[in-house]
Image: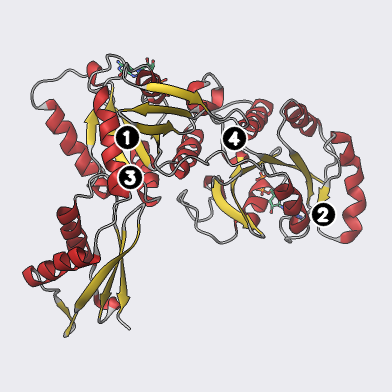
Amino acid sequence: MAKPTVAIVGRPNVGKSTIFNRIVGERISIVEDTPGVTRDRIYSPGDWLSYEFNLIDTGGIEIGDAPFLEEIRQQAEIAIAEADVIIFIANSREGVTSADEEVAKILYRSKKPVVLAVNKVDNPEMRAEIYDFYALGFGEPFPISGSHGLGLGDLLDEVVKNFPQIDEDDFDEDVIKFSFIGRPNVGKSSLVNALLNEDRVIVSDLAGTTRDAIDSSYQYEDQDFVIIDTAGIRKKGKVYESTEKYSVLRALKAIERSDVVLVVINGEEGILEQDKKIAGYAHEAGRAVIIVVNKWDAVEKDEKTMLKFEEQIREHFLFLDYAPIVFVSAKTKKRLTNLLPAIKTASENHSQRVQSSVLNEVIVDAVAMNPAPSDKGRRLKVYYATQVAIKPPTFVVFVNEPEIMHFSYERFLRNRIRDAFGFEGTPIRIITRQRS
Ligand code: GDP
Ligand code: GDP
């Protein structure tokens, strides 16, 4: 089930990031966070009652050096493009300002439900201040205080009431969902278009008429695929689409809905810090990952170029040692046909279940070959292992004392499992437990 997305909009200083933090609470966002720089946290899971959703603080998406009004307009556009429900925040202390009216005008034009919150109502006596805000035209304003945590329950009640009833991610179990992620201009939309125009690809329908997602379903050699959420990719031309934060936001959304994530790198430009960051999100989320080096046509090469590029990738993406690398060109379509089989294999490995008996033979052999080192006179004993989950394959290894399991030994076991069962393209998780 895809989680709905809620976006917070409003002009600067109304309290957007304060409220964002209140709602997502202490949870560690996968958008990594420099302490104190709340601005970096723009996307995080949140929940209310039994509802789960993703929350976006559009205020955290800076649009280059756009003038103030232009920036908040763009942020409102992002909210409309990305969210199922929009929380529009104004400031009770300042009344309705022309910037609020500007945001309101943009929000009217969308069909997305908008819940208006008036912030900084820190005590009940101040509730009278909210009536002016009816003028914004979004019905009853909800008085809240981000810094005191007041009124948020009523606000969230209203938000969840507006969640869409239809679940668009209701694809068949055996459909493989994948997405292209990466920095702006690496060629994501060109790759999608090139794939959809492949001769042997049968595009069967375009889903997503109820929401903004334009997922493409298609079939290739009897396997059904869905390219996830390429809306941001194919409807291009908005200024904010070239910003780094927005590309991260798109990546996170796409990762969440995918089984297999194709991390696209621009072969012409090489590997940049931002590529690593984006790839890191896919890895952390436990998705199957394929590294796609695009624009290979534009690279001047000799017989060593590809190998060298591969080495660089391995060096920079240590955590993605399991990810196959495919060199392609969306422009010339060279090697493009390698993508779908690679996606299929990665997906199969991602959902592979291994038999306990065979798994334990592998573990016994591994331990015999390379016994766990002792630590402060105590020796780790590995008793047995069992697979507890797929997507990604997750193994519980039972031992005498979990505290003395060293990460390097864990890595050794993981590699043995990988070698024995062929888990190319998927991360593997190992959980160490004490045998009870
Ligand atoms: P943003 O720019 O919209 O994200 O606003 P911030 O969340 O950064 O808040 C702007 C300022 O308003 C900060 O100094 C906050 O401490 C303050 N603030 C936020 N919420 C409240 C509130 O409910 N009451 C009061 N009095 N101040 C608040
Ligand atoms: P996105 O922002 O990641 O979706 O990137 P686009 O698909 O819009 O591509 C950005 C630019 O790179 C466009 O000008 C494309 O024509 C160009 N481009 C995309 N793929 C290739 C490729 O394989 N080779 C070359 N030479 N150019 C490409």
x, y percent for residue 29: 50, 53
Q: Is residue 21 above or below residue 224?
A: below
Residue at the image point whose x is 23% and y is 35% from the top: 325
Query: How far apart are the two marked residues, 2 and 1, measured between alpha carbons?
Result: 45 Å
Q: In this rendering, would 164 be left or right of 119?
A: left
Query: How far apart are the two marked residues, 4 and 3, measured between alpha carbons?
Result: 24 Å
Query: Which is more foreground, mark 2 or mark 3?
Result: 3
Q: Secondary structure at mark 1?
A: loop
Residue 95 appears in the rendering: yes
Amino acid type indicated by mark 3: Ala
Q: Secondary structure at mark 2?
A: loop
| First in sequence: mark 4 vs mark 1 | 4
Query: How far apart are the two marked residues, 1 and 3, measured between alpha carbons?
Result: 21 Å
Query: Which is more foreground, mark 4 or mark 3?
Result: 3
Q: Determine which of the numbered discs, if any, sits on residue 288 in the image.
A: 3
Q: Secondary structure at mark 3?
A: strand
Q: In this rendering, would 196 be left or right of 126?
A: left
Q: Which residue is mark 4?
A: 82
- Determine contact: label 2, label 4, CB under 8 Å: no
Q: Secondary structure at mark 4?
A: helix
| First in sequence: mark 2 vs mark 3 | 2
Amino acid type indicated by mark 2: Val
